[in-house]
Image (cartoon, helix red, strand yellow):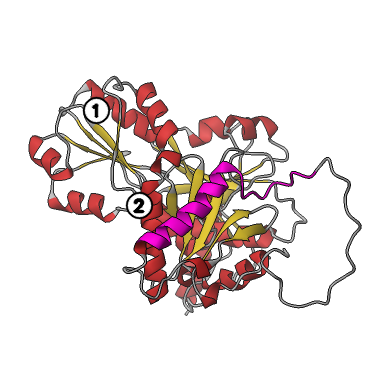
Amino acid sequence: MTWIKLASLALVVVLASAGISKNEDLECMFLGYPDLEYDGFDRTEVLTEKNFNRTVFAEDTKSVVFFNDVEEDDSELDQYECFLQLSAQIMTKRGYNFYTVNTTKEHRLRKQEEVEKGEDTIHVYKDGYKIEYNGVRDPETFVSWLMDIPDDPVTIINDEHDLEEFENMDDECVRIIGYFEPGSVALKEFEEAAEDFMGEIEFFAVVTSKWARKVGLKRVGEVQMRRPFEEDPLFAPTSADTEEEFEDWVEKNKEPVMQKLTLDNYFNLWRDPEEEERMILAFVDEETREGRAMKRLLDKIADENSEHAGTLEIILVDPDEFPLMVDVWEDMFGIDIEEGPQIGLIDISEKEGIWFDMSQVNLDDPKKHSDSNFEALQSWIDQILSGSISLDDDDDDEPEPPAPPPTPKGKKSRKEL
């Protein structure tokens, strides 16, 4: 067995010479994968303002950068380290380098890369463009997402496989499809605009009349945006044919009325809305009869309210896809998710919501009551859009009433949050 010891020693020497040091103090457990272990080698480097640009923007490099304000005595540090180190252990052999940036110290670098103060985020730098990761931070989800990053910002549809990929994304994400002459300046501008939205929006193009017909495009230069849960596409202005014009149009229209929460987009959706937005959260178990009926009702609501995109934001959550979060959400909002569909106007930071009375809709016989169900839910949404139903405290000028006596501990009501 001496040769095994010598081989192991040689591996340590090789890794050390490559700048990979042993991280013996970090203990990582990955339940469910009995043969998966962190090997103890540190594959991350710290970047500063002095070496950032020349490192991540070097030619033919693929970099993963974790921007964080986690201090060395933070209890979360080991969790972040385990996540990063196992991801690096898998992906460095696939050409990725892993780095960290302490945003508490690197103020200018944080602003340069547009990272919010106090925010922890991950950027991937590849082939000269930047992609932000908004998914949950576990190695399996992140590595899977990283492996799926396309080589090019635009997928050219020229076979049935590409067409199937495009069609299978229906209701999963915002898609943009354009019809261009092959090798044209307009196609090049379209591709350059797509680089700024990688990881957020999927861009496709066709360059022949055959594939244009299959995706529903009629003329060269036509560009459509297809948003989840909306039947009719949006058409880019015929005047939009430069990178900046494409970018402006996409930025203005990219927010759909309804999106589904997934592991990959979690932190893109689970965030405080903009000041003018109204965020509605819908828990719908699509494996139940009631859940399927509620989903069809929400599909119609989203399509009929497409003009309110950017103001009305519905987040669709299938609780079966987030089993560990069900108890957290029930406690956070004071609702019973497992009793059936729930939909409410919410504030994530304040952990509060105003919940729709589900007795107003009949999900047992949805076909018979489709019109009345739609009218009831649409009326509630109209009140939210008009401000009649609001989470804002409009009584700031009134004297505060005396504090009520403490109530006995028990299950929270819908408004006691």
Answer few, some or many: residues within 10 Å of disc 2's Cα (few below 14, many 20 plus, some between 14 and 19). Answer: many
Answer few, some or many: residues within 10 Å of disc 1's Cα (few below 14, many 20 plus, some between 14 and 19). Answer: many
The furthest residue to the left = 210
Q: Where is residue 417 in the image (x, y as percent from the top left)?
A: 72, 63
Q: Is the magenta stretch mostly helix, strand or loop?
A: helix
Q: Under tag 1, what secondary structure?
A: helix
Amino acid under disc 2: Phe
Image-based side of 272 in relation to 2, left or right? right
x 57%, y 71%: residue: 326
Q: Under tag 2, what secondary structure?
A: loop
Q: Which of marks 2 and 1 is in front?
A: 2
The numbered mark at residue 229 is: 2
> Is 157 included in the stretch rendered in magenta?
no
Image-based side of 118 in relation to 342, left or right? right
Quickly name the residue at label 1: 187
Vertical arrangement, residue 177 with respect to residue 14, above or below: above
Magenta range: 371-395
x 64%, y 49%: residue: 390
Q: Where is residue 48 in the image (x, y as percent from the top left)?
A: 64, 36
Q: Where is residue 174 in the image (x, y as percent from the top left)?
A: 36, 45
